[in-house]
């Protein structure tokens, strides 16, 4: 299992990268919008400088047509770095773009996946990652567990190199389900990771241990005994 941060907020990336075993960072135009009118390429390069060259950085194209997607990809690789995973929506134009990008050796993530068929096509086109939208599928009455399990089954059956990068989560339970269904990686807002370890029953137990120790030893820690 690998965890990625689905954010472009530099402060959050710095903070949580130091805490959690993060495998990379993902973004999309809506996520970038939250940061305001930033210098896009400088901002992405700063993210890269925080996470380092060995981690995965996923940046999404903005063009809607194949030719524009290819131009966006070339620009991203030139102005950020050549190891970026270029995120491409799995549409008719996107599938063509994914196939052409892979012919040119570009790392590609097929995103906006809502169905098995989208995922299958992206896998066959050569996508390195496919990103099924867990919560959005569930909101539409689509079974995300079944979609991810089917994608994982086809990857195993036909030995595709593609990995499932599950996305669009509202809570940690959905992340657990995505991993159990077969996703190798998942990207989420940092607040979901933080919330996992900040639940009242966890902090309550820690506070009780602290109070019991202090009732005997005061503020003296084990390392000071």
Image: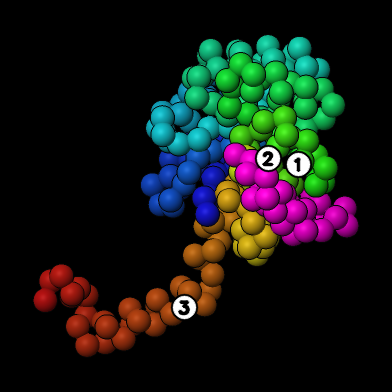
What whole-number distance in Å separates the C-alpha atoms at marks 2 and 3? 39 Å
The part of the image, by quadrant, that contains residue 163 is top right
Residue range corresponding to the magenta coloring = 134-161
The answer to whether residue 77 is left or right of residue 97 is left
Residue 152: % across, % down: 67, 52
What whole-number distance in Å separates the C-alpha atoms at marks 1 and 2? 6 Å
Residue 88: % across, % down: 71, 28
What whole-number distance in Å separates the C-alpha atoms at marks 3 and 1? 43 Å
From this view, report whether residue 209 is shown above or below residue 90.
Answer: below
Residue 143: % across, % down: 82, 58
Q: Which element type, helix, strand or loop, lies under badge 1?
A: helix
Asked if disc 1 and disc 2 are in contact, CB closer than 8 Å, the reply is yes
* Residue named by callout 1: 119
* Residue named by callout 3: 204
Q: Which element type, helix, strand or loop, lies under badge 3?
A: helix
Callout 2 crowding tier (Cα within 10 Å): few <14, some 14–19, many ≥20: many
State yes or no: residue 155 in magenta. Answer: yes
* Mark in the foreground, 3 or 1: 1
The answer to whether residue 187 is left or right of residue 205 is right
Q: Residue furthest front?
A: 158
* Mark in the foreground, 2 or 3: 2
Q: Which element type, helix, strand or loop, lies under badge 2?
A: strand
* Residue named by callout 2: 130
The residue positioned 82% from the left and 46% from the top of the image is 115
């Amino acid at each position: 299992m690998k965890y990625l941060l689905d954010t472009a907020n530099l402060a959050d990336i710095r903070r949580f990268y130091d805490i959690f075993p993060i495998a990379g960072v993902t973004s999309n135009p809506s996520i970038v919008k939250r940061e305001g009118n930033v210098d896009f390429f400088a901002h992405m390069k700063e993210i890269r400088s925080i996470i380092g060259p060995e981690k995965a950085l996923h940046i999404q194209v903005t063009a809607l047509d194949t030719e524009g997607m290819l131009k966006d990809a070339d620009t991203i690789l030139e102005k950020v770095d050549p190891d970026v995973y270029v995120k491409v929506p799995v549409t008719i134009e996107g599938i063509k773009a994914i196939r052409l990008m892979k012919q040119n050796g570009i790392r590609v993530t097929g995103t906006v996946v809502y169905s098995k068929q989208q995922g299958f096509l992206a896998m066959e086109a050569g996508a390195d990652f496919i990103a099924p939208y867990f919560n959005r599928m569930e909101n539409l009455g689509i079974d995300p567990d079944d979609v991810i399990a089917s994608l994982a089954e086809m990857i195993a059956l036909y030995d595709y190199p593609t990995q499932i990068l599950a996305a669009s989560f509202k809570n940690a339970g959905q992340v657990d389900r995505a991993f159990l269904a077969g996703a190798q990686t998942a990207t989420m807002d940092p607040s979901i990771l933080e919330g996992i370890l900040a639940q009242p029953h966890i902090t309550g137990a820690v506070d009780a241990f602290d109070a019991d120790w202090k009732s005997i030893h005061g503020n003296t820690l084990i390392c000071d005994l």
